[in-house]
Image: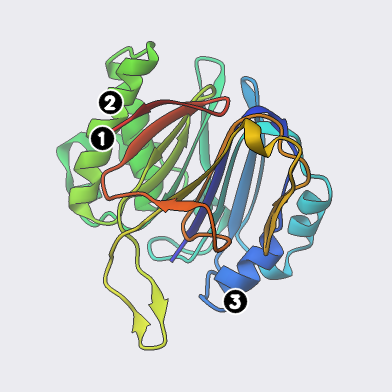
Amino acid sequence: MCELFAMSASVPQRVCYELDLFAAEGGERHRNRDGWGILFALDRDAYLFREPDPAATSELTKMVVRNERPCKQLMAHVRRATAGKPELANTHPFDRVVHGRRHAFAHNGGLPGLEDRDDTQALIAEKIGDTDSELAFLLLLDRLRRAEAVEPAVRFDIFTRFAAEMRELGSANFLFFDGEHLFVHADRRRFETEGGLTEPREPGLSIRSFDERHHGHEWKTRGASIDAISGPLHLFASVPLDPEGWEPLARGTCMMLKDGAILSRS
């Protein structure tokens, strides 16, 4: 099971997302050993760090954690390969520059049959790697381009319909950043138990929200922390990172956020 984490905040926050500890918790034990990536979005561009090696033993991960970048939007992924080899080209988040803005996409799950669809045939040649996740990203970008979608409400509608199609193929937990908004889709995921992997089940993502009442408070858990919360912010994770405050998202939940505000939810 891949692990997802994201943040949308009203003001730049310095989030210490300790991928080495998170990977030790969700990676060494759960065998997410096939790469990691983290994106710190700043206006139209972003810092993006990726590596196809285990986060738990990565020197680059330690450097990123020591020098975390203040940002309003953050997206992170720890990979357990199910489609595509453990190599850089297959490491999330995937990114493309569209109309002068960096777009990024991360996925937890599997989408069998995606390459066989008529609407993906022309996009296969555009892939850098060989994952169904990257192909899904290209399909979403293609639909936004064809619709000439500029208005956020139109982009959210396209994302919602796209997500509904993808979850009919398989598990489709998505994080998508369009250079301005964070889009989230919750589906189902596999869980590791003493008896082995479960079949996909809810929840695929959970949300934890902070508002003005938490201003100045510290949030700290194994693998992630914020020294001082400033203004409203929302966190998303594949599994709750601490015992309190997390809301599981029902299958099919789609959200669009900007700067710590939930603009749309369906």
Quadrant assignment for the C terminus: top left
Tag 1 residue: 162
Q: SS for tag 1?
A: helix
**Residue 224 sits above or below residue 12 on the image:** below
Q: Earlier in the sequence, mark 2 or mark 3?
A: 3
Left or right: where 164 falls relative to 130: left
* Mark sitting on residue 259: none
Extreme-bottom residue of the structure: 195
Confirm whether residue 55 shows in the render. no
Query: Is disc 3 surrounded by few (<14), some (14 to 19) or many (20+) residues within 10 Å?
Result: some
- Judge the density around disc 2: few (<14), some (14-19), many (≥20) Cα neighbours within 10 Å: some
Q: Secondary structure at mark 3?
A: helix
- Residue type at mark 2 is Ile
Residue 104 visible in the current orientation: yes
**Residue 209 horizontal/vertical position (percent):** 53, 41
Figure quadrant of residue 83:
bottom left
x 69%, y 67%: residue: 21
As drawn, 98 above or below 188: above
**Amino acid found under the numbered disc labelled 1:** Phe
Mark 2 highlights which residue?
158
Q: Position of residue 157 (x, y in %)?
A: 27, 24
Q: Nearer the viewer, residue 217 or 160?
A: 217
Disc 1 crowd rating (10 Å Cα; few below 14, some 14-19, many 20+) is some
Colouring scheme applied when the structure was drawn = rainbow
The amino acid marked with disc number 3 is Glu
Residue matched to label 3 = 28
Residue 223 percent coordinates (x, y): 67, 61
